Amino acid sequence: MAVEQVFEVRVTTPDEWRIACDTMRAALLSGPVSDEVWAKSGAGWEDHLSYTAWAGDRCVGHAGAFRFDTVVPGGARVATAGVTRVGVLPTATRHGLLSRMMRDLLVAARAEGRVLASLRASEAVIYRRFGFGVAADSLSVRVDTRRARPVTGAAPGSVRVLQRSEILGVVPAIYDRVISRPGAVTRPAFLWERYLDDALTGDKAGNVVVHTSVDGVDDGFAHYTVAWHEEPFIDTYGVGEVHDVFGATPAVELALWEFLVGIDLIRHYDVEERPLDDPMRLAVRDRRACETRQRFDEQWLRLLDVESCLAARTYRPGPSVTIAVQDPWFEDNDDVFEVGSHGAARRGRSTPADLTVEIDVLSAAYLGTVSWSELAAVGRVAGDAEAVARADDLFASRPLAWCGSFF
Ligand SMILES: CC(C)(COP(=O)(O)OP(=O)(O)OC[C@H]1O[C@@H](n2cnc3c(N)ncnc32)[C@H](O)[C@@H]1OP(=O)(O)O)[C@@H](O)C(=O)NCCC(=O)NCCS
């Protein structure tokens, strides 16, 4: 007869962080963390919500959340729980442990004022049940430098390569100043150290360049890595990876791209994450210079506080719409909200609703990139077509939502 296992779920104490880390890594098919990596990971565990599942004294699961802000349409930045480090050991899966940890995590995040949760999913079938919806996709792209040149629309100015010692003093401040695309997130210091590791340490060819406007203002940067392609000497060339291109305007980003595709020897760049409406796609000489390798669900969002999230973003002109939200986890989200061109407000359950949705659907539509009509077409929105069209008009937002920060 099978023995019923008893599991405990609780906040992880600091002395348990490393075993929690190893548990999560094992679930994600990696070995235990090395001393060297762990020494660099400390800050990423300190400013972090962390819940673990235990079978007696064995740690069998972990779920955590970083603290940062997400840009929403109109430019406001809302406090976000960046759900991360999720894993349950194979000996303990399908006992409801992720469900318990996720609930505790989201309740704690909301209690400290985080109005939104955001995550990147290993599998697309896990998170909808917890109220997450895909709010934006991202593209993996290969850029053929020779076919891309010349790039049109680049902002005037100059580009300089940063020395290692300058990078952390310069780049985070530029990034914080220039991010405006809905879905972008602020990056805590420990994430910068992780993202820029190849440019900051060791002998890898990681580089950071900064664009400066004609007025002398640093208004964008790019982070990229280059390497020789292993081929016979007769056909030598370089390849690169572009990790970040962020500018105050599309023209600044194009100036950075103009610099990148002009570097001698580099035949192509692989770029893991770019927005669907990346200006580079229209700025290249040959449209096929930017080859889409993959389109994937980047940004899973869950509104933790519907009233605050709806009030934080702006809407386009148009007649208002009332939306009934169903949220089994947070009672005060389970209400009717009115959204109009001047903002959003709670109206109370007795108010007739034009549209009725579950929380994952509202979360998917929130940034104005996934349309209400797309969601209605697959049966996820209850309401008539005219009200769906009104919601489309109010919520739509350009540029499209995109984050570009994997966590
Ligand atoms: C994803 C993972 C954390 C789920 O943990 P878990 O404790 O087994 O999840 P739960 O028992 O709480 O599952 C809740 C529900 O989700 C379903 N579910 C969970 N993981 C699933 C998966 N990978 N595929 C399909 N369904 C899944 C369960 O069947 C259950 O469904 P039910 O409510 O209808 O019974 C675990 O499978 C895991 O560690 N996977 C490998 C690492 C990983 O992918 N981590 C996520 C990183 S983003």
Image: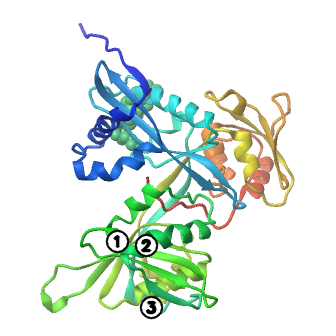
Q: Give the spatial CA distance, label 2 vs label 1.
A: 8 Å
Whether the residues at callouts 2 and 1 have beta carbons within 8 Å, the answer is: yes
Residue that carries the numbered disc 3 in the rendered image: 149
Are there few (<14), some (14-19), or many (20+) residues within 10 Å of tag 3? some
- Three-letter amino acid code at the position of disc 3: Arg
* Kind of residue at disc 1: Ala
Q: Which residue is mark 1?
A: 199
Depth check, front residue: 196 or 70: 196
Q: Residue sitting at 64 percent across and 89 percent down?
A: 215
Which residue is found at the position 44% from the left and 39% from the top?
64
Q: Residue 310, how many percent across, how many down?
A: 73, 47
3 or 1: mark nearer the eye:
1
Circles 2 and 3, Cβ within 8 Å, touching? The answer is no
Q: Amino acid at mark 2?
A: Ile
Q: Please report contact status of discs 3 and 1: CB closer than 8 Å, yes or no.
A: no
Residue 238: x, y in percent? 27, 83
Q: Quadrant of residue 252?
A: bottom right
Of the two numbered discs 2 and 1 in the rendering, the one whose residue sits closer to the viewer: 2
Split into quadrants, the picture shows ligand 1 in the one at top left
What residue is disc 2 on? 167
Is 15 located above or below residue 365 in the figure?
A: above
Evaluate whether residue 208 shows in this view. yes
Q: Earlier in the sequence, mark 2 or mark 1?
A: 2
Residue 11: mark: none
